């Protein structure tokens, strides 16, 4: 049997198991709260693994190893920023958000913020939900495109057919089981991703150390980076002064999105059963993150040691290429499913987030509670899926990914400020929250479209501007009770 056939068989078995397991979990969904937030019943282990699988997407398996392969030690700053942000969110925010969301009976991300600011709750729901649904609508399409490209790179499968296959895999159990099915299938995918990120560098290190002199580029990561040139060992990328500071600051600024501002992650905190389980989730999430990021960086550097710094045309494919180099086909099939798992995990998580935001915060108030809320949520999920697929089919990839590029700064860094001040500053008013959301989103679009993002990261600037707007507006438009 050919190697490619063995890989396909393994991936098909995995996809079928995922599909059936998602449907099996969905049988427990009885109402709209089950659909939106798993009835607030998840254990810490399930919630943390779901949060990690959703948070990393294909970034940890394609993006980060590819960047480490292309830039060497420079990419350490990005990894530090992400890891610090994730650890902060689990230690400082997770249990607080769980506790407050349960007390307020909040079922969606904007519902949580709105109920914390009762005086302007409806405005927050409208502004927040419209913003999230619009941008994450394109984010769903981007995941379909990303998954299809992965299948195209691996099997030369037509990208349009690849997108259809991914939709057919993801949509049925997401529509049927909502957040619960998504969370429990995320657990499987987080485990597969983790195994891929740990096993690959271990085997890779053994491989480069045991090869003959001319069989590999270098016999250790240190030798590979040194041989590749000074730019691969320089953690400032050869820049000095302001340029180096701006580059490092922009890389570290990835942490700001993790400060509660990414709705698809924060809803995992909200879905945890109790504070005790939130602390269990903290331990699992932190351990997963540290080892996974070390593994992702190592994969990129091992790629240099095996292939040299210039021999991989599409650097984001370094992990799939490395897998086929190091493992037999069956193992490759199992580990490559980790890449597809990452894409699927983010696609269904963002889909269910957008559907519940639209259904619970925009459509349901208009219907004034009439009709079947669970059926309504499922219909919205189907409609969003089809529209996202159409957008992915007929819009250019460049346009879709440009819109997605706004998400981390415009959504993540903006809502991080809103969440932090909502939790820790009693003077933060509902009016200030609304103005912060609108102003920061407009600023992000301005900063990126004018090209200033190339000088100073939009992530950093949006976080700073959002903070200033939130504080100033809280004094100008104080809470009524103050």
Image (cartoon, rainbow, N blue to C red):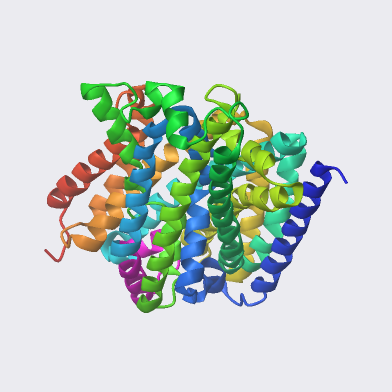
Q: Residue at x 30, y 28 (%)?
A: 236
Q: Main secondary structure of the magenta part?
A: helix
Range covered by the magenta-colored residues: 93-113
**Closer to the camera in the image, 293 or 147:** 293
What is the quadrant of residue 307 in the picture?
top right
Residue at the extreme front: 212
Please check the rendered image and state whether residue 108 is part of the magenta-colored stretch, yes or no. yes
* Residue drawn at 70 percent across, 34 percent down: 153
Judge whether residue 415 can be spotted in this image.
yes
Q: Residue at x 48, y 39 (%)?
A: 64
Whether residue 263 is visible here, answered yes or no, is no
**The magenta stretch spans residue 74:** no
Q: Is residue 282 above or below residue 295?
A: below
Q: Is 86 positioned to the left or the right of 35 in the image?
A: left
The spot of residue 33 in percent (x, y) is: 52, 72
* Horizontal side, residue 35 vs residue 455: left or right: right
Residue at 71% x, 60% y: name it: 172
Q: Residue furthest right?
A: 1
Image position of 458 with respect to 55: above or below: above
Q: x, y (%) of residue 334?
A: 69, 53
**Residue situated in front as seen by the camera: 274 or 417:** 274
Q: Quadrant of the C terminus?
A: bottom left
Q: Is residue 482 left or right of residue 450?
A: left
Number of numbered callouts drawn: 0
Q: Nearer the viewer, residue 326 or 413?
A: 326
Q: Position of residue 288 (x, y in %)?
A: 46, 59
Quarter where residue 463 is shown: top left
Q: Is residue 356 above or below residue 402?
A: below
Where is residue 83 drawn, in percent x and y? 37, 50
């Amino acid at each position: 049997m050919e190697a490619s056939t063995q890989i396909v068989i393994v991936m098909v078995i995995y996809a079928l198991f995922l599909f059936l397991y998602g449907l099996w979990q969905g049988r427990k969904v009885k109402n709209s709260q089950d659909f939106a937030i798993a009835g607030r019943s998840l254990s810490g282990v399930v919630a943390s693994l779901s949060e990690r699988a959703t948070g990393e997407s294909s970034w940890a398996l394609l993006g980060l190893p590819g960047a480490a392969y292309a830039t060497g030690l420079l990419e350490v700053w990005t990894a530090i920023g992400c890891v610090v942000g994730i650890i902060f969110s689990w230690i400082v925010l997770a249990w607080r958000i769980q506790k407050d969301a349960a007390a307020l009976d909040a079922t969606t991300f904007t519902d949580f913020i709105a109920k914390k600011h009762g005086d302007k709750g409806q405005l927050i729901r409208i502004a927040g939900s419209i913003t999230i649904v619009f941008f994450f609508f394109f984010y769903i399409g981007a995941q379909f495109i990303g998954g299809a490209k992965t299948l195209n790179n691996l099997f030369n499968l037509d990208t349009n057919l690849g997108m259809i296959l991914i939709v057919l895999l993801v949509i049925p159990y997401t529509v049927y089981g909502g957040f619960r099915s998504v969370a429990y299938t995320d657990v499987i995918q987080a485990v597969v991703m983790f195994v891929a990120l740990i096993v690959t560098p271990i085997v890779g290190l053994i491989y480069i150390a045991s090869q003959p002199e001319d069989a590999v580029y270098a016999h250790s990561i240190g030798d590979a980076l040194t041989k590749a040139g000074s730019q691969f060992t320089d953690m400032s990328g050869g820049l000095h002064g302001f340029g180096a500071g701006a580059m490092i600051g922009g890389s570290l600024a990835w942490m700001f999105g993790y400060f509660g501002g990414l709705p698809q992650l924060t809803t995992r905190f909200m879905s945890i059963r109790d504070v005790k389980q939130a602390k269990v989730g903290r331990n699992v999430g932190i351990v997963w993150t540290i080892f996974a990021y070390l593994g992702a960086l190592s994969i990129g550097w091992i790629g240099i040691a095996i292939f040299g710094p210039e021999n991989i045309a599409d650097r984001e494919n370094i992990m799939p290429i490395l897998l086929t180099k190091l493992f037999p086909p069956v193992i490759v099939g199992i580990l490559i499913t980790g890449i597809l798992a990452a894409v699927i995990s983010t696609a269904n998580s963002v889909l269910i987030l957008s559907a519940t935001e639209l259904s619970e915060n925009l459509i349901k108030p208009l219907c004034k509670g009439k009709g079947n809320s669970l059926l309504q949520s499922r219909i919205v999920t189907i409609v969003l899926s089809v529209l996202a697929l159409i957008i992915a089919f007929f819009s250019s990839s460049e346009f879709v990914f440009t819109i997605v590029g706004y998400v981390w700064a415009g959504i993540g860094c903006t809502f991080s400020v809103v969440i932090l001040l909502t939790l820790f500053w009693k003077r933060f008013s509902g009016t200030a929250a609304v103005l912060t959301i609108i102003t920061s989103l407009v600023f992000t679009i301005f900063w990126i479209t004018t090209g200033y993002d190339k000088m100073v990261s939009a992530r950093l600037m949006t976080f700073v501007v959002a903070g200033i707007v939130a504080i100033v507006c809280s004094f100008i438009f104080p809470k009524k009770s103050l």
